[in-house]
Image: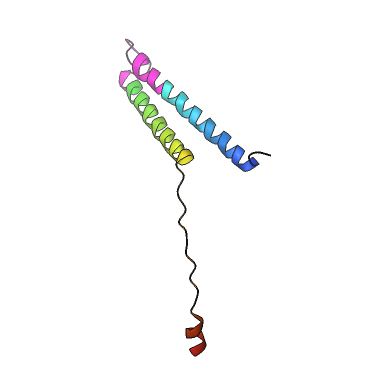
Amino acid sequence: MGISKSRRIKRNLNIKIILSCIVFFVLGYYLLNYVSTKENPLLGNTFHILLGCILMAVSSLLFVIKVKNEFFPKKRKKTSHVFLDEQKEAKS
């Protein structure tokens, strides 16, 4: 039958987030290397340099976090069950 509906929705959401990270990284790269090197950009060179660096940094961090959570999930701790000692309970 395949993958459950909730896993499929979660996988599609992760793919969309990763694709948006790539798009924002490319946009930041464009702002940093092309728009900021023009003679007189609209809001100034410094604004485009900062915005490009911020977009690239945030999209990189989000990409790393999503990939880490997708391919390296947290390991669940195995809990050991603790049972009360029946002999001590009977003496009380």
Measured from the top left, where is residue 8 in percent x and y?
61, 38
Residue at 48% x, 79% y: name it.
85
For the N terminus, the quadrant is top right
Q: Which residues are magenta?
A: 27-46
Q: Residue furthest front?
A: 87
Measured from the top left, where is residue 73 in percent x and y?
46, 44
Please check the rendered image and state whether residue 20 is part of the magenta-colored stretch, yes or no: no
Q: Is residue 28 above or below residue 70?
A: above
Q: Residue furthest top?
A: 39
Measured from the top left, where is residue 57 in percent x and y?
36, 30
Q: Nearer the viewer, residue 83 or 52?
A: 83
Q: Nearer the viewer, residue 57 or 37?
A: 57
In this orientation, does residue 13 appear?
A: yes
Task: Place residue 43 in its image quadrant.
Answer: top left
Measured from the top left, where is residue 91 in percent x and y?
49, 89
Q: Residue furthest right?
A: 1
In this orientation, does residue 92 appear?
A: no
Q: Nearer the viewer, residue 15 or 88?
A: 88
Residue at 38% x, 20% y: name it.
29
Q: Is residue 72 above or below residue 88?
A: above
Please check the rendered image and state whether residue 37 is part of the magenta-colored stretch, yes or no: yes
Residue at 42% x, 30% y: name it.
59
Residue at 37% x, 24% y: name it.
52
Q: Is residue 6 above or below residue 89?
A: above
Task: Place residue 6 in its image quadrant.
Answer: top right
